[in-house]
Amino acid sequence: MFPVFLEVDIKNIAILAGIGLLLLTILSIIITKHKYKARYRRFYKKFDKVINKKYNGNMLIEDLINKYTVDNTNTYKSLKRKGKKITKKYFEYYLKNLPEQVLLKSFISPDMKRNELVIKILDEHERLLYQWDKTKKFKTFLKAINKHQMLTPMIAFLYELPLNINEGNPYRIVNHDNDNILTYDVVKNPKKVDKKINLKKNKKDKLNKKK
């Protein structure tokens, strides 16, 4: 058997080692968080600078209305050729960088698993008409804009979205021509959100039919 004083020393060493390991873990977490914060700040600062210089939604809308719009349907297909080219480039830039912003921000958020951006078009009854996430093809995005006549609201929405994501604010735009709504969410799995929303919508529709 070990002498009593030796057993005490071993226990103290084990306790100190445990405390040291815990402190190192905490320090590692703090350093990692700091790195992610710095990385996110750099990304957002550059993103904000570029969108205000090259992809300003207010200026694009003004140009489309004054130069490139063929009719008043508020659709992508109503634009002249040059208008389509400019607008496509605008949309592609935002749809590429917004999911990255959400992902980087998730590293410094309480729930890191909520790292997927979802953009939704709802009707006036809050029922889902279309949902975009990074897995969707660009053609379906344009098709939804045409179908629901959401060209200028979508341009304005995307322009303001980075700031709202950065500040963690809910955000929505109402298209007063048809009362359709644009909003967004940050989720763990866009596919599961799709199913839940559709189930709720179907239940509401069935109840309304019964009435």
Image (spheres, rainbow, N blue to C red):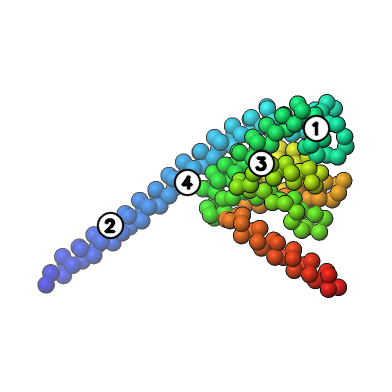
Instruction: Mark 2: give few (<14), some (14-19) or many (20+) Cα within 10 Å.
Output: few
Give the amino acid type for the residue marked by disc 4 in the picture.
Lys
Image position, residue 92 (x, y; %) = 65, 36
- Between discs 2 and 1, the one toward the N terminus: 2
Residue on which the image places disc 1: 79
The residue under the point 64% across, 58% down is: 193
Image position, residue 47 (x, y; %) = 61, 34
- Left or right for 5, reference 50: left
User: How far is the residue under mark 1 from the one under mark 3?
Assistant: 17 Å
Give the amino acid type for the residue marked by disc 2 in the picture.
Ala
At mark 4, the secondary structure is helix
At mark 1, the secondary structure is loop
Residue on which the image places disc 4: 33
User: How far is the residue under mark 2 from the one under mark 1?
Assistant: 69 Å
User: How far is the residue under mark 4 from the one under mark 3?
Assistant: 34 Å
Please name which of the two marks, 2 or 4, marks the residue nearer to the observer: 4
Residue on which the image places disc 2: 17
- Residues at badges 4 and 3 in contact (C-beta under 8 Å)? no
Residue on which the image places disc 3: 138
- Left or right for 37, reference 137: left
Instruction: Mark 4: give few (<14), some (14-19) or many (20+) Cα within 10 Å.
Output: some
- Left or right for 101, reference 174: left
Instruction: Mark 3: give few (<14), some (14-19) or many (20+) Cα within 10 Å.
Output: some
The residue under the point 69% across, 36% down is: 91
- Between discs 2 and 3, the one toward the N terminus: 2
Please name which of the two marks, 2 or 1, marks the residue nearer to the observer: 1
